[in-house]
Image (spheres, helix red, strand yellow):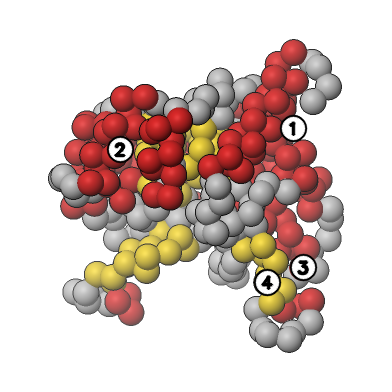
Amino acid sequence: MHPGIGWRQPHYAEVLARQPDLGFLEVHSENFFAQGGAALAVLERGRADYPISLHGVGLSLGSAVGLDAWHLDQLAHLVQRIEPVRVSDHASFARGRWAGRPGAPMVHAADLLPIPFSAEALDVLCANVQRVQDRLQRRFMVENLSAYLRWRPQPGAWMMPETEFLTTLATRTGCALLVDVNNIYVNALNDALKGSAGDPLQHCLDWIDAIDPAQVGEIHLAGHCHVDAAPGGDRADEIVIDDHGSPVCEPVWQIYQHAITRFGVVPTLIEWDTDVPALDVLLAEAHRANTLAQAVTTGARP
């Protein structure tokens, strides 16, 4: 299966005109919730030429207050209209009550905030994912997150490893996992910057090995950047950000090759959301992913 690309506004017209050889196009679901207009018209034109994957950023699947019924309704209408090949969102939360007080206004952080890998959080996530699948009447995909802070367990409490948390989610709900290889590497790099022992690359390979191949529905590849949390700070202030603004780096390609060797050749996406380059740059990244997949399939040297 040929890889896909994230289809962003700068490339709408060029993709429709050139129709490059791609396996699918992926868009952010929330950008097409309007019941009409130019954006939806473009998406419907793209759907005539390519399979479409809908990738959300706002469902807030990990929120203890539950899902926003309006948001889920809009997603359901879009799914019915576009008939995508896959629908996904993140193992994160963004929605809650202001200051956590009952009766307080509901707020949305407009960000992907991490959830604790606890039994209680897993129950919440499972219930919300099941509600999405019941509403959409299809298997849903949940993506692992790049996280810039971690929850600490209460004294005597226990947190699961992320891989156990996600595989248990998939087992209990029947959902699929969207494995973002870059997110795994970003988290490993940030752990290393904080002094965690171990090689980041090996950590990522072990992460992949802990996932059941039957649960994987898609893979994401993207670039990241290193920034100083405090201007002029030392290495202790450095943080790695999953900004989707550069080519896939060599270690992530290595992890990807390991992933498709273990999972098989599953649908793969090149994400590029900031400093969006010329279309040919994305196509070259997709071509490299395809070359690696063919090498794994045939046993040839990439």
- For marks 3 and 4, give the one nearer the viewer: 4
Task: Please name the residue shown 84% across and 53% down the image.
Answer: 199
- For marks 3 and 2, give the one nearer the viewer: 2
228 to the left or right of 5: right
Quarter of the image for the N terminus: give it. Answer: top right
- For marks 2 and 4, give the one nearer the viewer: 2
Check disc 1 and report the residue beneath it.
258
Instruction: Look at the picture and state if 246 lies above or below 175.
Output: below
Secondary structure under badge 1? helix
Secondary structure under badge 2? helix
Number of other residues with Cα within 10 Å of mark 4, as a class: few under 14, some 14 to 19, many 20 or more: few
Between the residue at mark 3 and the residue at mark 2, the CA separation in whole angstroms equals: 41 Å
Check disc 3 and report the residue beneath it.
193
Between the residue at mark 4 and the residue at mark 1, the CA separation in whole angstroms equals: 28 Å
Q: Which of the marked residues, 3 or 4, is nearer the chain's N terminus? A: 3
Mark 2 and mark 3 in contact (Cβ < 8 Å)? Answer: no
Task: Please name the residue shown 44% across and 28% down the image.
Answer: 19
Residue type of the residue flagged with mark 1? His
Residue 227 is marked as 4
Instruction: Look at the picture and state if 43 lies above or below 184.
Output: above
Q: Which of the marked residues, 2 or 4, is nearer the chain's N terminus? A: 2
Residue type of the residue flagged with mark 3? Leu
Task: Please name the residue shown 64% across and 30% down the image.
Answer: 287
Quarter of the image for the C terminus: give it. Answer: top right
Q: Which of the marked residues, 3 or 2, is nearer the chain's N terminus? A: 2
Secondary structure under badge 3? helix
Check disc 2 and report the residue beneath it.
43
